[in-house]
Amino acid sequence: MSSSSSLSTPTRYTLKRSRSIANSSDTDNTPPRKKSRRDRLVAALVQPPDCDLDELLRRRVHDSEDDTAIGDLKNMKRLKRDQDIANVAHTIIDDIKAAVKIDIKNEGRKIMEVELYLKWLEGFDFVLKAIETVLDAKVPGTRRRVPGLGRLSFSILYNLIDGFVDEVNAYQDGWSFRYPIGPVEPDPLVMSLAEECYDPTTDDRSDEAIRAAEKFFERYDNVMVAAVRRYKSECNKKLMAVAIDRKEESLSRGCCLLSEQTGYGGTDDMGFNLLVKTRGAMMEWKHEVGSSSSP
């Protein structure tokens, strides 16, 4: 009996030590397995997915001889989650901002804030052209459009414009709430408000930049509303109605904020003239589902 007791004691001691280590203050009372899983989830949210959507949209989609581009876009496994598409959209925005900064430096003159925002917007041109091509793509040998591209097209356009609003807001506030969170330093290549006041050309330049941005928004609206309608026709529209309603409300708030900060769409209208067709189609989607489900 005594020998059996002496053998069991170290075993109990070892187990108690293991539990003590796992629950020590060094691990914040979190079991190692759970903490590792949490870290992986956080990393998945903040890291861009491993796919070159920029390259695919910018070059391959417009190559009429590349019959595989649409299929590759449709089958990108790392674009199945909304968060993946949001991360890719932010990567595209960051690349556009970097390219714009180089262009401004090469031009050799300071620009106004509204001109900076216009350059960011115009950087989306290749995305609009690509999405137009995607939505018009036909199944080879038929007149039928390639199915399954509505959600992806809509999500890309939604996240790009949502990210654009965030970037404008961050530049004006001097603080970014997008990962990585932190201060946004004023660009020395962009005029301060004081510099704009003393430059006699700024009024005309501002009006011209706003008109050009509003024209671009009209084009963006035409492409995005087509993506909304395609998405609606391809998905379970009743199931997705709530999500679309939330996105429409978020888009409306973004347009309001953008109008207030830039003058797009008329400051008195508070963004009501921005993305009118898209927001109307999204509200119609919600109302159709609501009326069909009512007794």
Image: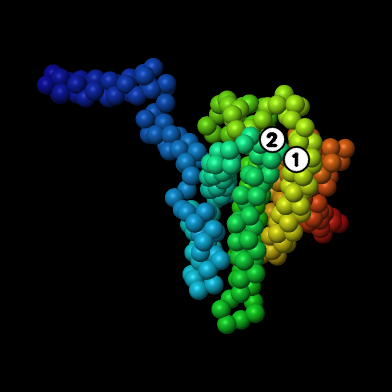
Q: Dots 2 and 1: beta carbons under 8 Å? A: yes
Q: Is residue 66 left or right of residue 112?
A: left
The spot of residue 194 in percent (x, y) is 72, 24
Q: Which mark is residue 205?
A: 1
Residue visible at 19% across and 21% down in the picture: 10
Which part of the image, by quadrant, shows the N terminus?
top left
Q: Position of residue 14 (x, y in %)?
A: 24, 23
Furthest residue toward top: 25
**What residue is shown with label 2?**
112
Front residue of 284/114: it is 114
Residue 3 higher or lower than 269, as above or below: above
User: Is disc 1 placed on a helix, strand or loop?
Assistant: helix
Q: Residue 262: name its quadrant.
A: top right
Residue type, label 1: Arg
Secondary structure state at the residue bearing disc 2: loop
The x, y position of residue 79, in whole percent, is 52, 54
Mark 2 Cα shell of 10 Å, populated few (<14), some (14-19), many (≥20):
some
Of the residues under marks 2 and 1, which one precedes in the sequence? 2
Image coordinates for residue 278, horizontal then vertical, percent: 76, 54
Q: Is residue 108 above or below residue 29?
A: below
Query: Which residue is the extreme one toward the left?
Result: 3
Which of the pair 111/258 is nearer the observer? 111
Nearest the eye: 192 or 38: 192
Question: Which amino acid type is shown beneath numbered disc 2?
Answer: Met
- For residue 56, above or below residue 88: below
Left-right relation of 63 to 198:
left
